[in-house]
């Protein structure tokens, strides 16, 4: 695959992403090497690896979740995290106002 990937891609298809993630998992390359080779931010490659892990975990379940269930679960987790962040932000603003600190 490495020789095929030497060419610049205009679009990273799922198949190409899977091939790169597989090479990383097999130890044939690293995230930093792939990042430099293909001019992709390491964080994006890490996201691909995380997605692959979630998909692999789901595939190995006795009763795999369908895609809709996976996205609904992920959406719920993100909404909960957002709600917690908003509560913390409001609490910090309230504390700042009680301490007499102004937003600048």
Image (cartoon, rainbow, N blue to C red):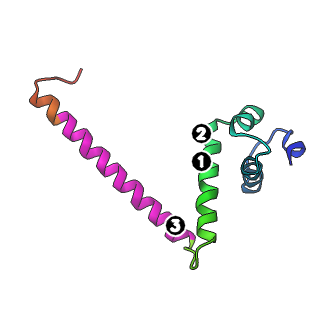
Judging depth in this view, the residue of 13 and 64 nearest the camera is 64
Q: Position of residue 30 (x, y in %)?
A: 72, 40
Image point 11% across, 26% down: which residue? 99
Q: Position of residue 67 (x, y in %)?
A: 56, 69
Mark 3 to mark 1 CA distance (whole Å): 16 Å
User: Residue farthest to the top?
Assistant: 104
The disc, 2 or 3, on the residue closer to the chain's N-terminal end is 2
Label 1 secondary element? helix
Question: Nearest the camera: 15 or 49?
Answer: 49
Q: From the image, which quarter does the C terminus lie in?
A: top left
Residue extent of the magenta highlight: 67-93
Residue at 28% of width from left, 45% of height from top? 86
- Measure the alpha-carbon separation of dots 2 and 3: 22 Å
In depth, the one of 40 and 22 nearer the eye is 22
Question: Which residue position holds label 2?
Answer: 43
Q: Are marks 2 and 1 in contact (CB under 8 Å)?
A: yes
User: What residue is pinned by disc 3?
Assistant: 70
Q: Few, some or many C-alpha atoms within 10 Å of disc 3 (few <14, some 14-19, many ≥20)?
A: some
Q: Secondary structure at mark 3?
A: helix
Residue hosting label 1: 47
């Amino acid at each position: 695959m490495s020789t095929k990937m030497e060419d610049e891609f205009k679009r990273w298809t799922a198949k190409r992403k899977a091939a790169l993630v597989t090479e990383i998992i097999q130890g044939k390359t690293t995230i930093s090497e792939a990042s430099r080779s293909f001019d992709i931010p390491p964080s994006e490659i890490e996201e691909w690896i995380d997605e692959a892990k979630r998909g692999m975990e789901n595939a190995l379940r006795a009763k795999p979740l369908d895609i809709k269930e996976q996205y609904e679960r992920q959406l719920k987790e993100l909404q909960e995290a957002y709600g917690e962040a908003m509560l913390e932000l409001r609490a910090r603003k309230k504390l700042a106002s009680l301490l007499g600190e102004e937003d600048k």
